[in-house]
Amino acid sequence: DTGVSQDPRHKITKRGQNVTFRCDPISEHNRLYWYRQTLGQGPEFLTYFQNEAQLEKSRLLSDRFSAERPKGSFSTLEIQRTEQGDSAMYLCASSLGQRTDTQYFGPGTRLTVL
Amino acid sequence: AQKVTQAQTEISVVEKEDVTLDCVYETRDTTYYLFWYKQPPSGELVFLIRRNSFDEQNEISGRYSWNFQKSTSSFNFTITASQVVDSAVYFCALSVKKSSGDKLTFGTGTRLAVRP
């Protein structure tokens, strides 16, 4: 059983550039979540998909952030016009979706904005 | 709104000592779920346990045990005979069932250092 995978693992970019991250959930998991974790803090919820539908977005998700999950499989998280404050670990998790299931996390993408 | 408090920022113990990590939660929902995750230096969050609000039975898994007390809104985690490999950041988290999803609300974590 393959776990949640994320790509890339590390991304260094200059302020103002756009970046895109990818998350592949555990197969047959129909729920997918994005979280952001800054240094010394716990992960904070960003957004959630049930299959291809984006059902909830956090206020942390500014207009510069967009997430998609076409066909209800993998998901992408794009950040436009990156700012230094966007530097963080971006975590993806998936769950089966039958009730309040356990969320299994990927290794994360660490973003550094210079 | 949900809130999770992990008051212990860092704990340092010597190998083979027992250690308890505290977790206090707040929610107005009567149905909720509590979790513990481990984050080793590699960064990946590893699931340890999930409990629902109707099951206050304590659980033991090897050297790990969990004490859930609704009366004090606490869900504490004890590692018996700690080992160096237990060194990590441990997060307590809470979720409630909503039609829009079941996002996790995390505490700020407790960094555990186990010295040989």
Image (cartoon, helix red, strand yellow):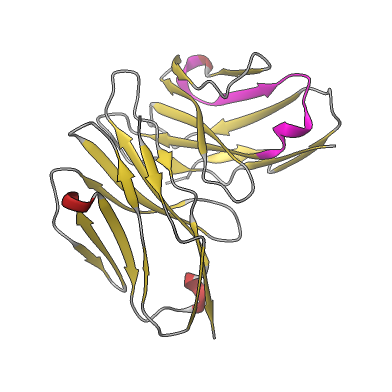
Placement of B47 over or under B114, stated as above or below:
above
Give percent across and percent down for residue A64: 68, 16
Count of numbered circles in the view: 0
Splitting the image into 4 quarters, where does residue A31 fall? top left
Give percent across and percent down for residue A27: 42, 34
Which residues lie in the magenta part?
A71-88
Q: Is residue B28 left or right of residue B7?
A: left
Residue at 51%, 36% in the rendered image: A44
Placement of B29 over or under B39, stated as above or below:
above
Placement of B100 over or under B4, stated as above or below:
above
Q: Is residue A97 left or right of residue B104?
A: left
Q: Quadrant of the C terminus of chain B?
A: bottom right
Give percent across and percent down for residue A12: 81, 39
Residue at 48%, 54% in the rendered image: B109
Viewer-nearest residue: B110 or B57: B110
Q: Is residue A11 left or right of residue B35?
A: right
Residue at 58%, 21% in the rendered image: A61
Q: Quadrant of the N terminus of chain B?
A: top left
Give percent across and percent down for residue A78: 67, 22
Splitting the image into 4 quarters, where does residue B22 fall? bottom left
Residue A81 within the segment the image draws in magenta = yes
Residue A23 within the segment the image draws in magenta = no
Q: Is residue A75 left or right of residue B65?
A: right
Viewer-nearest residue: B47 or B109: B109
Splitting the image into 4 quarters, where does residue B57 fall? bottom left
